[in-house]
Image: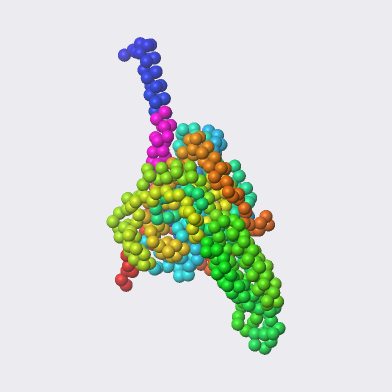
Amino acid sequence: MTLSKSLRRSLLAFAALSVMASAAAAQAPEAQKQQTVDLVKSRAKLAQVITDQVFSFGELGYQEIETSKYLTALLEKNGFKVERGTSGMPTAWVARWVSPAGAGPVIAFGSDIDGIPKASQTPGVAYRKPMIEGAPGHGEGHNSGQAVNIVAALALKDIMVRDKIPGTLVMWPGVAEELLGAKAFMVRDGVFKGVDAVIFTHVGDNLDTTWGLARGTGVISVEYSFSGESAHSAAAPWRGKSALDAVELMNIGWNMRREHLRPEQRSHYVIVDGGDQPNVVPSKASVWYYFREIDFANIRKNYEIGNKIAEAAAMMTDTTVTRRVLGAAAPRNFNRPMAEAAQANMDKVGLPIWTADEQTFAKAVQKLVGAKEEGLATKLKPIEPPPSPPISGGSDDIGDISWIAPTIVIRYPSNIPGLPGHNWSNAISMATPIAHKGVVAGAEAVAMTALDLLTDAKLLAQTKAYFETETLKDEKYQPLIGPTDTPKIEQNADIMALYRPGMRKLYYDPAKYPTYLDQLGVKFPELGPKAK
């Protein structure tokens, strides 16, 4: 059968219009968003593997060697260019991917990767069961955030290539966040220069975000080291100059001063070196302080008071004192247009649908720690304005970045409500279906929000305008570290050297086991110890 020229032209024109219509549909923001979400969901297995793998490493700050090696290899495999050893930290890195359509807006994705001491815990069991007694673990849930970001970025990357969307995706880790030890150095060294927006992710028990000055504090982390003279504690104590006496006097002086500081302050210390043995007057002793307050001026004021008390303690004991700033965190100030865009996307994502087993397990863990037995969240937390007046609390060095580029934090529901935080119980859910579902929900919200920033010029302009006119209106960034301060990269090396050989035997092998629970022989949900 032969078609006439006019009919052929009509059919070709119709086909061309159909292709154009399909392309337009593919490029429609909501269609793109749904396709991005679908691409995230298609990587649910990858999200589970990353989450479980990093959980099994359980590494402390500055010693995230296996974690960084694994994550950077994964990113390089997926087309990212990786620069390692950022700001003098062996486990820090920055990974970049530039769209073939052009550099476009630069969106940076960050999340922490370090664990906490003595938090080793078998996941998926509602009772205390260390995998290795005394070892570190992910009792903060930092094993999951990079899974959120990487899965979101890979989904975005597919859409950006297909639809020729210009943009640059930048991935980076929060090294030693529990020590507040990395981000201020990265800011000082220009890592975030030229970044248009930062999306940071952190584990939580809901899917939420905030804007403005966040609840909590900024902090300076500083170690005071006293030097004296040793002597026989019984035969000639008068010949000694006790560095430990100086440490104790400093602590007494600070504790007396607390009563006369603003109630917003938070401060704490640990004696990291108290001498060698009782019959030797300690010639060396050190104490490590966190000075927290809600604004730059008062953080510096309390730090100066601490320095004065340290000098006085040295004078009283005829010792000398030096100090080293180990890390810092600025108060956090988050971007409202970005947060509101993220909230709109989280409203679309919603919370995961939890199974009866998952809810039963969550309630068992809550009972274990004496929390309200309410189970996992089933209602999204609404976005709220910043507290007024400001409320004191914890710190996070994402605060430093929030004064350099428009920044938000997206929290995702991979943990159980009511737990104490910084505790072994917070590790229980972090390699279970609860964590895996929460990571995917978080990745969906992150991917859609980043897509908004890449494709909506108005939103990006509003984000930048808010940063310039609101974030920086009353205060500008004041670095709390100096130009010569350096990260204490040797921190935790001795602890990891002690426990890593045993931990290595328990690293997750996804080639052999579908999940880490399968490798550990845990039948989720395990509500009590198995009978022997």
Q: Residue at x 37, y 50 (%)?
A: 380
Query: Residue pushed farthest bottom?
Result: 235
Q: Please identify the quarter of the rendering in which residue 290 is found.
A: bottom right
Which quadrant of the figure contains the N terminus?
A: top left
Rendering coords of residue 146 (x, y %): 48, 51
**Most foreground residue, 161 or 247:** 247
Q: Please identify the quarter of the rendering in which residue 300 is found.
A: bottom right
Colour convention of the picture? rainbow
**Most foreground residue, 373 or 258:** 258
Rendering coords of residue 244 (x, y %): 62, 76
Magenta extent:
24-44
Rendering coords of residue 5 (x, y %): 38, 11
**Most foreground residue, 73 or 301:** 301
**Most foreground residue, 54 or 424:** 424
Q: Please identify the quarter of the rendering in which residue 61 is found.
A: bottom right
* Residue 82 appears in the picture as rendered: no
The answer to whether 15 is drawn above or below residue 352 in the figure is above
Q: Residue at x 39, y 53 (%)?
A: 206
> What secondary structure prevails in the magenta region?
helix
Q: How many marks?
A: 0
Q: Residue at x 57, y 52 (%)?
A: 400
Q: Residue at x 57, y 56 (%)?
A: 295
Which quadrant of the figure contains the C terminus?
A: bottom left
Is residue 446 on the magenta stretch?
no
